[in-house]
Image: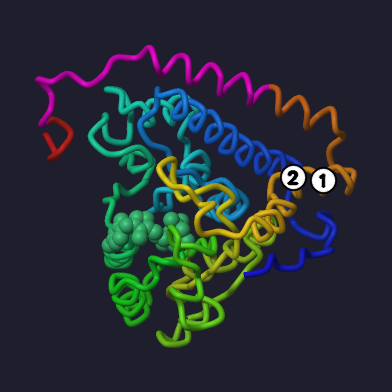
Amino acid sequence: MGAPAPTEQPLSAYQLSEQSLERMYSYMLLARRLNERMMLLNRQGTAPFVIAGAGQEAAQVGAAMALQVGVDYLAPYYRDLAMNLVFGMTAREAMLNLFAKRDDPNSHGRQMPSHWGLRERHVVTQSSVVATQLLHATGIALAAKMRQDPVVVMACCGEGSTSRGDFHEALNFAAIHHLPVIFFVENNGYAISERVEKEVPTEHVADRARGYGIEGATVDGMDAVVVYQTVRQAVDQARRGRGPFLIEAKCYRLWAHSSDDDDSRYRPREELAEWAARDPIKLFRERVQNDGIFPAEDLDRIEAQIDEEVRDAAQWAMAQPDPEPADALGFVYKES
Ligand SMILES: Cc1ncc(C[n+]2csc(CCOP(=O)(O)OP(=O)(O)O)c2C)c(N)n1
Ligand SMILES: [Mg+2]
């Protein structure tokens, strides 16, 4: 799969405030720096397992910023660290999750790292079985519709997960009942070592929307602003009762599948280099600078603050307590 051609539109053509653009950059960079630090800790033997979203930050931040935090629901998948940051997760909490610490707000150390979920922030808990969250999201959207709550649910997965029955059942049900769900597929080209051509028979994942009579769109997932614009429109429609939308963000997994994978055994280095040249964070920085929105010094300042935040988060989280053995059955079932 080749990298899509970037858009030539200046940022001033979009209706995004400077503050929103700064938030976009900060969330993307924070996610990347957290992932880099996590991988380092893994290689040092301190963190057991890392599954990162490097290369998918623009897709994740653009999509999550189109939702109303505090109102809408997020059913993320494991790579969606950046989405969780937009929904309020802090760097320290992300590190507590990595180390499976007692105070990890996601599962208090019960789940694997990157299995998100926090009721107060409307982030739906997930299992390791890919695509199950799409059905949960559809159920939440049904409840919202029955209660007449103006809630939109964002259900995320990778393109490989769209081959599972759950994906098709979720789209079918959501389409029939006009439910407010955005199915957001982060097409990063691979399902572990399997290339997209062996996962999906159509050119685009979004082509599948037609089979369910719903709208679909394929967007450049390396461009946070384009993703935001597309998702925003779909969210507004869904909130007005127009039903579900399937959005495919074409991005790329810049790292191996996980800290336990060796991608050099199956992925051509030239392909990786082609996509790495379109690193979404590098592109965004160049764009806001070239369009005269932020001077380099402002961006350097943001970067320095984030580096400090990540260093602090890792050190602090490592020193936090592990779960108590006596508490092993806690946080599994609802306790009144
Ligand atoms: C039902 C199921 N089958 C297989 C797996 C093992 N598995 C974990 S991640 C993954 C790849 C999923 O690929 P994709 O949906 O494209 O997401 P990506 O990891 O590329 O972001 C697989 C096969 C699983 N977790 N669940
Ligand atoms: Mg994939």
Which one is nearer the viewer's eye here, 91 or 199? 199
The correct choice, above or below, for 228 with respect to 305 in the image is below
The correct choice, above or below, for 203 with respect to 67 in the image is below
Q: Is 177 situated left or right of 289 in this image? A: left
Residue drawn at 51 percent across, 61 percent down: 186
- How would you classify the magenta stretch by its main secondary structure? helix
The correct choice, above or below, for 175 with respect to 318 in the image is below
Magenta includes 310? yes
Magenta includes 321? yes
Look at the numbered discs 1 and 2 and tell me whether their residues touch, using CB distance below 8 Å: yes
Q: Is 33 situated left or right of 303 in this image? A: left
- Helix, strand or loop at mark 1: helix
The percent coordinates of residue 331 (x first, y second) are 18, 33
Mark number displayed over residue 282 = 2
Q: Quadrant of ligand 1?
A: bottom left
Amino acid type indicated by mark 1? Glu
Which one is nearer the viewer's eye here, 147 or 122? 122
Can you identify the residue that label 1 sits on? 286
Amino acid type indicated by mark 2? Lys
User: Between marks 1 and 2, how big is the CA–CA gap?
Assistant: 6 Å
**Occupied quadrant, residue 324:** top left
Magenta-colored span: 305-329
Instruction: Tell me the quadrant of the picture where the N terminus can be found.
Output: bottom right
